[in-house]
Amino acid sequence: MNVKIFDTQEVQDFLRLASGLEQEGGNPRVKQITHRILSDLFKMIEDLDITSDEYWAGIAYLNQLGSSQEAALLSPGLGLDRFLDMRMDAEDEALGVKNGTPRTIEGPLYVAGAPVEHGFARLDDGSDPDGQLLIMHGVVYDADNQPIPNAQVEVWHANTKGFYSHFDPTGEQVPFNMRRTIITDDQGRYRFQSIVPKGYGCPPEGPTQQLLNQLGRHGNRPAHIHFFITADGHRKLTTQLNMENDPLVYDDFAYATREGLVVPVIEHTDEATIKANGVDAPFSELIFDFKLSKLVDGVDNQLVDRPRLQA
Ligand code: DHB
Ligand code: FE
């Protein structure tokens, strides 16, 4: 039987009490957020006539999500990271701020403290036997289309199994494998050699995949490469490039693919080209120029501070 009590004075007073709104101490913002979440939950329980069994299954799920460290994985999977980006885009539009390269989600797998190189970096340690050579290069431009020397290009990506160093369940990768910070040269150029990544998939037995299964959704991403681009006088750009030839390029469970962030993969087998690029085997080439946006009233108004692994 679905009884209705949410709108009674008793329940409304109880929500204020449980959220600390009748107490002096504590943090007003946390009280406000708690009150809203609790109110929405109470209402949902009533509207959907949530059973006790369903409720306790949900609580067990949250415990499992936390103990497997997957909360920041579920978040993009449910589109929340994408929604935060949509809000930042809308704020930019309202302020008349133009973005060169579109932003897209950071994802949960960045690690601070990668080795710093100038102009060029080799990202992989050469140990992945399935690794197909990759060369990527381009220029970092400012909002006026001028190249930016000494810009910082932080890059990270997965290996041929779709695993990231520091988060690899096989334990095979050395620290900072496929993670570097490249400082652009005097013409704003960056270049790196690595191996072609494979798309990431959620841990198949984990709570994120478990929920996605219930939604009839997959938990896979197309092959992609992550970037933070930083330069004086500009806003930090958080973005990813997706490889055009991946069948999932427009079917990303984390909704990070965007117009302007899909790059063609150029295959080279010609001996002269191979030699001219300083490698010894056929390789895939990605070319991409980043364009930053100016600070807004002298500040990066959209800098995201979140807990990140520091190694
Ligand atoms: C997730 C994984 C990624 O590699 C990424 O870029 C974004 C999200 C995830 O597991 O949610
Ligand atoms: Fe990723």
Image (cartoon, rainbow, N blue to C red):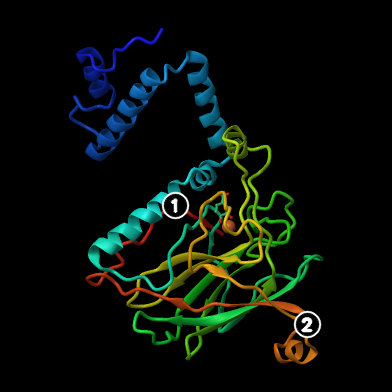
For label 2, count other residues whose C-alpha is less than 10 Å away and answer few (under 14), some (14-19) or many (20+). few
Say what amino acid the circle numbered 2 marks. Thr
Residue on which disc 1 sits: 82
Residue drawn at x 54%, y 22% is 57
Q: Pointer 2 and pointer 1: residues touching (CB < 8 Å)?
A: no
Q: Position of residue 129 (x, y in %)?
A: 82, 66
Q: Quadrant of the C terminus?
A: bottom right
* Count of numbered marks: 2
Q: Nearer the viewer, residue 212 or 120?
A: 212
Query: Residue 133: which quarter of the image?
Result: bottom right
Mark 1, ligand 1, within 8 Å: the answer is no
Q: Is residue 56 left or right of residue 4?
A: right
Residue 120 vs 99, above or below: the answer is: below
Say what amino acid the circle numbered 1 marks. Arg
Q: Position of residue 280 (x, y in %)?
A: 79, 84
Q: Is residue 285 left or right of residue 80?
A: right
Q: Nearer the viewer, residue 242 or 107?
A: 242
Residue drawn at x 69%, y 68% is 196
Label annotation for residue 56: none
Q: Position of residue 191 (x, y in %)?
A: 59, 81
Q: Secondary structure at mark 1?
A: helix
Q: Position of residue 27 (x, y in %)?
A: 25, 37
Residue on which disc 2 sits: 269
Residue 283 vs 215, above or below: the answer is: below
Mark 2, ligand 2, within 8 Å: the answer is no
For label 1, count other residues whose C-alpha is less than 10 Å away and answer few (under 14), some (14-19) or many (20+). many
Residue drawn at x 52%, y 15% is 53
Q: Disc 2 and disc 1: Cα gap in Å?
A: 38 Å
